[in-house]
Image (cartoon, rainbow, N blue to C red):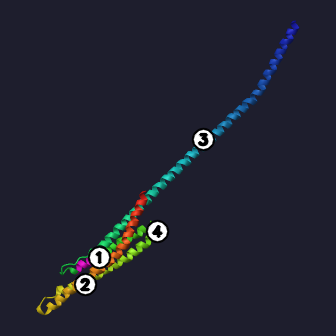
């Protein structure tokens, strides 16, 4: 009975010893596997975090690029709008300087006044040309460009009629001013006044016709500019 118990006890001890030995043999391997798994997770986590950081960085870059593009687009639209307004403003000033013709009282300063007016017309025309060149940077519409060309041509003809009138008027007024109104020069004086009236009448007729031709293109351009400005807003 004691022997059997001893045998049982010895068996229990032997079994327990074997299980313990198996556990300790397997433990380093299992611990190594767990450690490797942990290291893999850390590597994967770092990679994921790196991808996230790159994504955030790329997103911020794209956003800043879009913001810059929107700013540039807004600046370009603003410059285009200003160019359209400046073009029409300078054209109107040039046209008004041609159309607002004065017939002066005859005096010794007549020629200086005419030279000043013609000089202003030149200055306004040059300013208009600058605005037209600036507008050309923003407009590539062929129809609109052709309208500008036709308007320029009609306005230059209108201007030439005004210039010719001023030069002829100055010549007549010089003669009138120098006329002494003596008995023998009275008839000449009357003829000069008649010539001046006829010149003015002819000028008014020619100027009116040329102005109508100008308005034909000016109205179209004004409507196109208005449409472009409102299209830009909407």
Identify the mark nearer the N-term, 4 or 2.
Answer: 4
N-terminal of the pair, mark 3 or mark 4, is 3
Query: Does the residue at mark 1 contact the one at mark 3 (Cβ under 8 Å)?
Result: no
How far is disc 4 from disc 2 in space, using C-alphas? 42 Å
In primary-sequence order, the first of circles 1 and 4 is 1
The residue that appears at 53% across and 51% down in the rendered structure is 62
**Circle nearer the viewer, 2 or 1:** 2
Earlier-in-chain disc, 1 versus 3: 3
Pointer 4 residue: 141
Which quadrant holds the N terminus?
top right
Q: Give the image quarter of residue 37.
A: top right
Element marked by disc 1: helix
Disc 3 and disc 4: Cα gap in Å?
A: 52 Å
Residues packed near mark 2 inside 10 Å, few (<14), some (14 to 19) or many (20 plus): some
Nearest-to-viewer mark from 1 and 3: 1
Q: Residue shown at 40%/60% (left/top)?
A: 230
Q: Find the magenta span and give its range.
A: 111-117
Question: To which residue does mark 3 refer?
Answer: 49
Question: Secondary structure beneath disc 4?
Answer: loop
Residue 2 covered by magenta stretch: no
Vertical relation: 89 (above or below) 62: below
Residue 228 vs 32, above or below: the answer is: below
Q: Quadrant of residue 221?
A: bottom left
Residue at the image point whose x is 60% and y is 43% from the top: 50
Residue 199 has which mark? 2
The residue that mark 1 highlights is 119
Residue nearest the viewer, comparing 38 with 183:
183
What is the distance, in whole Å, between disc 1 and disc 3 at their CAs?
A: 73 Å
């Amino acid at each position: 009975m004691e022997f059997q118990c001893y045998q049982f006890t010895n068996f229990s001890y032997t079994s327990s010893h074997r299980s313990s030995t198996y556990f300790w043999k397997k433990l380093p391997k299992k611990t190594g596997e767990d450690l490797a798994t942990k290291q893999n997770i850390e590597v994967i986590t770092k990679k994921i975090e790196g991808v996230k950081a790159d994504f955030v960085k790329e997103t911020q870059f794209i956003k800043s690029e879009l913001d810059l593009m929107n700013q540039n687009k807004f600046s370009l639209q603003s410059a285009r709008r200003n160019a359209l307004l400046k073009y029409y403003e300078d054209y109107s000033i040039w046209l008004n300087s041609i159309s607002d013709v004065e017939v002066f009282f005859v005096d010794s300063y007549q020629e200086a006044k005419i030279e000043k007016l013609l000089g202003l017309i030149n200055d306004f025309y040059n300013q208009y040309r600058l605005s037209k060149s600036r507008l050309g940077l923003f407009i590539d519409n062929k129809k609109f460009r052709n309208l500008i060309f036709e308007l320029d041509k009609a306005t230059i003809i209108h201007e030439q009629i005004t210039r010719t009138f001023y030069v002829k008027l100055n010549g007549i007024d010089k003669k009138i001013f120098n006329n002494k109104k003596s008995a023998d020069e009275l008839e000449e004086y009357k003829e000069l006044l008649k010539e001046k009236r006829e010149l003015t009448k002819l000028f008014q007729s020619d100027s009116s016709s040329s102005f109508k031709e100008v308005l034909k293109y000016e109205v179209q351009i004004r409507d196109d500019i208005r449409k472009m400005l409102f299209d830009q807003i909407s």
